[in-house]
Image: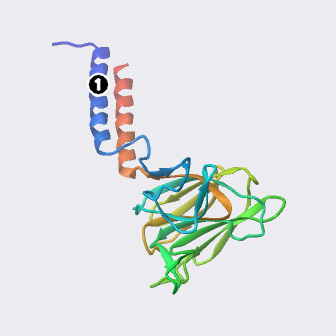
Amino acid sequence: MKCNKASLYKSIKKLCCFGFVILSFNEPLFADVVLFEDSFDGSSIDIDKWMVGTAEQANGRISGTIIAKPAFTTPYEIFGRITLPVSNVQPQFVVHLRSSGWNYFSTGVPSFDISGIALAFANITPEGLGDVLILSDPHQSPNPLAFPFFTSHGPISWNTNQENKIHIIDDGSVIKLFVNNLEIFNVTTDYSVGSYVGFSAFDSFLNNVEINSVPEPSALSLLAIGLGGLAMVRRRLS
């Protein structure tokens, strides 16, 4: 039984597509999986999503301190939009990574001091130049001085009183930060006290947040090999 090149290529292409569909049910290859998101468009904080500290929700944004209820296993990435005015408050906005939750004072009331690694944002000067500080919680054990205990990155040109996009990638050993699509730092650290993510907006607002899984490198490699093989077959048949 004979078949021409075109029909053979179509058969191979259909087989590859079928295989891709099967793989897609097991592991997404083209896009991250959304693990958690909130656009704060309700009348009050969604207590099914957040452990609420001092936070308030109004006009589609959050001020105060909240911790996401789910625990997140690396690798994951955080997308968010924040609004920072010029202010003497430092820090104005904090993202808490690898956290075990609240630190409690003797009264049992949760404070804004959340455990874990803090990425602390500030927009101080009238020129709009700010920075971000990275510090690990000094009250935690067993290694409160684990790198990065305190390091500063900047300056950052914030869009004052407008939305700024933040993008954080945490793969468990490296933390990357992008502000308005510009890479600010790439820091290596294994310091961790937990798997929670929190946010503190002091003189600022969190306008939305989305936390996604990151596709495994093996899955991306598999996709690349498959597409490369299909291209090779096409060249040989042409």
As drawn, which residue projects farthest toward the bottom?
106
Q: Taking 182 as reference, is 66 above or below it?
A: below
As drawn, which residue projects farthest toward the front?
43
Residue that badge 1 annotates: 14
In x, y percent, where is residue 114?
A: 53, 73
Q: Residue at x 39, y 45 (%)?
A: 220
Q: Amino acid at mark 1?
A: Lys
User: What secondary structure is found at the residue carrying circle 1?
Assistant: helix
As drawn, which residue projects farthest toward the right?
126
Quadrant showing the N terminus: top left
In x, y percent, where is residue 49?
A: 45, 57
Quadrant showing the C terminus: top left
Q: Residue at x 46, y 61 (%)?
A: 171
In front of the other: 25 or 228: 25
Q: Would you identify the image quadrant in which residue 123 lies?
A: bottom right
In x, y percent, where is residue 19?
A: 27, 34
Q: Is residue 62 left or right of residue 191?
A: right
Q: Would you identify the image quadrant in which residue 93 lies?
A: bottom right
- Local packing at callout 1 (Cα closer than 10 Å; few below 14, some 14-19, many 20+) is few
Q: Residue at x 35, y 34 (%)?
A: 229
Q: Is any atom of residue 153 visible in this view?
A: yes
In x, y percent, where is residue 117?
A: 54, 71
As drawn, which residue projects farthest toward the left?
1
Q: Is any atom of residue 154 visible in this view?
A: no
Please say which color scheme the image uses: rainbow
Q: Taking 44 as reference, is 154 above or below it?
A: below
Q: Taking 152 as reference, is 50 above or below it?
A: above
Q: Residue at x 38, y 46 (%)?
A: 221
Q: Is residue 132 left or right of residue 87?
A: left
In front of the other: 140 or 18: 140
